[in-house]
Image (cartoon, coloured by chain):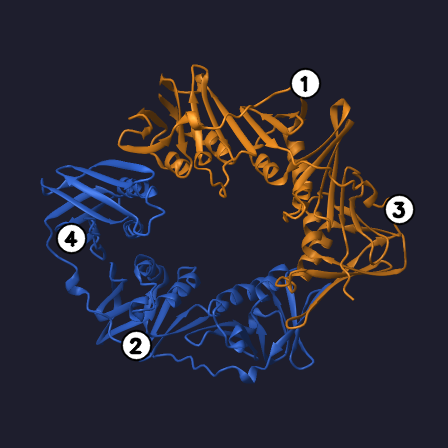
Chain colours: A blue, B orange
Amino acid sequence: MKFTIEKKILLDNLINVTRAISTKNIIPILNGIKMDLTSEGLYLTASDSELTIRSFIEYKEITKIDIEGSIIIQSRFILDIIRKLPGDLVNFELVDGLKIRIYTDNSEYNLNCLDPNEYPIIKMEEQKDPFIINSNIFKNIINQTVFAISTQELRPLLTGLNFKIVGDILECIATDSYRLAKKIVKLDKATDDEINIVIPGKNIIELDKILAEDDNLEMHIFNNKVVFKYKNITFQSNLLSGTYPNTSNLIPTDFNYMININLRDYYDAIDRAALLTQSKDKNIVKMSVNGNEMLISSFASEIGKVEEKLSIESNNTGNIDISFSAKYMLEALRTFKDEQILILLNGEVKPIVVKSVEDESLIQLILPIKTY
Amino acid sequence: MKFTIEKKILLDNLINVTRAISTKNIIPILNGIKMDLTSEGLYLTASDSELTIRSFIEYKEITKIDIEGSIIIQSRFILDIIRKLPGDLVNFELVDGLKIRIYTDNSEYNLNCLDPNEYPIIKMEEQKDPFIINSNIFKNIINQTVFAISTQELRPLLTGLNFKIVGDILECIATDSYRLAKKIVKLDKATDDEINIVIPGKNIIELDKILAEDDNLEMHIFNNKVVFKYKNITFQSNLLSGTYPNTSNLIPTDFNYMININLRDYYDAIDRAALLTQSKDKNIVKMSVNGNEMLISSFASEIGKVEEKLSIESNNTGNIDISFSAKYMLEALRTFKDEQILILLNGEVKPIVVKSVEDESLIQLILPIKTY
């Protein structure tokens, strides 16, 4: 294996594939990046066995291919090495069997490598007729939901993002059982089969980082895995097995209180009220609605208290006090871009629903916290 | 106590005084900021007993003074509170004895305070005829030396910065006994008494952050403390007691090898060679000089090796191999702005000295590491 390539091209592709390498991985070979140089170009593959990312650099983009071949380089320092090498071009040359020489005019690294024959065989499948979604729309789906997944391994399914496709409607749901985020998107094509899969949240977060530019994203869904294709990248994730809880009956459709409020003002008021509760686990603030006035307050016995007044429009002149996690509410509010939003309430121990005034595609739900 | 002030003015001053508050402090009252509002203006004081910072906001800069008075506010959330409050103005009002109301139109914090009478009495002295140094020059002195102080409490004096003034020459020295940084500056006035003090490095680092703009810095030196005055800020630090080691005979004046090298190239070569040694404590790289060629190399058995070639000018055509800590060398090199620098050597186990080609005021010394 011997070739010369532009540093920038190699680096961009290496950054993407190394996202598959887990810091918790204990299988030595999976800390490596497989490089396969053929007459077609250079394939870079990294995997933590649940997530595999492959990037392909076409031969036309490679400055010079002298000798084809395969090797596994250690991922640990490779990004820094390529980044710090001087000049625009970098040379790779396999020497002494399992050593690679990475060099420019006056700088030379000789790195120990691993045997490419020992790398697990990973099948990257494709379907003839995948779903195609714009990458920016898909990023939006991720960012409006993924924060609500569970970080607790107790209920593994809740650490994933639920994708349901019925007809041409894609529904994406995340919940940690204290809050729920739901986004609905219309697809370009309809499916006859109902699809209901759960993709590990940590993998979806890596996919989000890869989707940097506006382009098509192909989604190939299999029984036990999903393959995303984006530009020259193939991204294959396992699916979480089991049946995702049916959440459709959790979200109320009728509400006693429909409150119309300025998003920025509401966000800032909660943000300020949350300040004094930072050190606490629960981060509880209280929202008191009284006709057209809202009071956001919090209290920390050692430090003091804070009160924020907001004017609102409500369909109900009654009073209601409801307490919730400021952290959860702020994360939910960050998914909206609207000037005004709707806060929908039924009672002090009933879920709080947040929606856009005009756009029905996004729903955020937060369970209240009993403070008595 | 009741007053109205521009948020920005208050915040800038609070940020500076809170630098005196130690996160390790266990005396509750020293977690507070003392506010004294008089007809002259507002004094803000914070202290960790070894470092005291006082900032004074003149009455002309305060929008409205209603009632004078004193209080100690808790520092913990105060910066965030002021930062996050809406609008340009913020109101303070003492209520119920030891509570302060911090409010704008619709936002109100009520914070528990501490009794100002319980705050330690801190005398902030001044001399009639202090040393005056330009703040940018002083920042430069700090940044070219302070990184070399010791972080080990075993030899407390070495955790400080040694300032020596003889005549009109200020000499600043830092050493952790493995390396030494020395900077010499000519002062505007001469002193008859020889001055030799050691200022705690951690305090000097806070002073550096305060010196944001080009202005005069007054240095008032007392037996057991030093007071810096800069704009509206008084910065008082304790001194470390004891006699700082005499380092003048540690720095050789004659050298067998005088090597002239491009600073950027040398820095980058060591930076790249150091990559593979990152995980190691010692971070050792080897420099091999052979006539007009220099080789920087390092080796990590599991990972591989790296070699960097550099062309140099040397007064000596002989060979020399010398190993040192890449971290120490990189930190020393960062203090130079020159295009070319001098690497001065006497032998494999003798100190390495780094100097500017033209400017004699800065000397960096690094002890080699024996690798055999």
Kindly identify which numbered label has been placed on residue B129: 1
Residue lying at the far bottom of the rendered structure = A117
Mark 2 belongs to chain: A
Label 4 sits on residue: A349
Q: Secondary structure at mark 2?
A: loop
Question: Distance between the Cα atoms at labels 2 and 4?
Answer: 32 Å
Q: Quadrant of the C terminus of chain B?
A: bottom right
Q: Secondary structure at mark 4?
A: loop
Q: Is residue B9 above or below residue A331?
A: above
Kindly identify which numbered label has been placed on residue A241: 2
* Marks 4 & 3, CB-CB < 8 Å contact: no
Residue B142 image offset from top left, x and y in percent: 66, 38
> Residue A245 occupies which quadrant of the picture?
bottom left
| Front label number (2 vs 4) | 4
Task: Name the residue located 34 percent from the left edge and 38 percent from the top edge.
Answer: A303
Question: Distance between the Cα atoms at labels 1 and 2?
Answer: 78 Å
Type of the residue with mark 3: Asp
- Mark 4, other Cα within 10 Å: few <14 / some 14–19 / many ≥20: some
* Marks 1 & 2, CB-CB < 8 Å contact: no
Residue lying at the far top of the rendered structure = B39
